[in-house]
Image (cartoon, grey):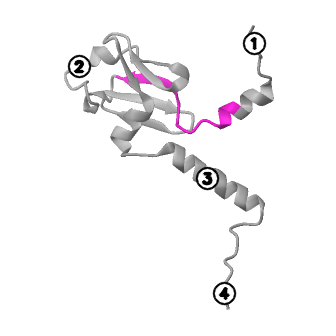
Amino acid sequence: MAELLVPDEKAFARAKRKTTTPRALEARFDKRTRRLKLRLDTGLDVMFDPRDAHGLEKAREEDFVGAVIEGGGTVLHLPRLDADFSVARLLEGFLGPMDWTRAEARAAASRRNGLKGGRPRKVVAA
């Protein structure tokens, strides 16, 4: 029989730090600017005309009202259109291709090397 293990706060914090892609905390449609605003867990706010996103070219402004974030911050849900969009893919579409996993791995390796005194010195053969 499987045993259910409840993570303690330290385990939960470790798992949260392992996240390699930005997650959305909030989505809101601004009627004044006609833009959809995503607040990310990185501290950035991203605003864009949602009709610039693939598949939303013909959507009306009222279709974006009530946008919500689901899936732990990975999915933008538009209930009036019954449509879901990956937050990471939306960001890539507007900001260009990004390999979030590779960038995070490089940053982690750099932090580990920094704790050891920095980049290892190259040995020059005589």
Give me the disc on residue 4.
Answer: 1
Which residue is disc 3 drawn over? 107
Q: Quadrant of the N terminus?
A: top right
Place of residue 74 in the rendered image (x, y in percent of width and height, measured from the top left)? 49, 26
Q: Which residues are magenta?
A: 15-30
Is 95 rendered above or below residue 64? below
Which residue is disc 2 drawn over? 59
Seen at 53% across and 50% down, the residue is: 103
Mark pair 1, 3: CA separation: 33 Å
Seen at 79% across and 25% down, the residue is: 9
Q: Earlier in the sequence, mark 1 or mark 3?
A: 1
Front residue of 94 and 113:
113
Which residue is disc 4 drawn over? 125
Q: Amino acid at mark 1?
A: Leu
Total numbered circles: 4
Mark pair 1, 2: CA separation: 44 Å
Q: Earlier in the sequence, mark 1 or mark 2?
A: 1
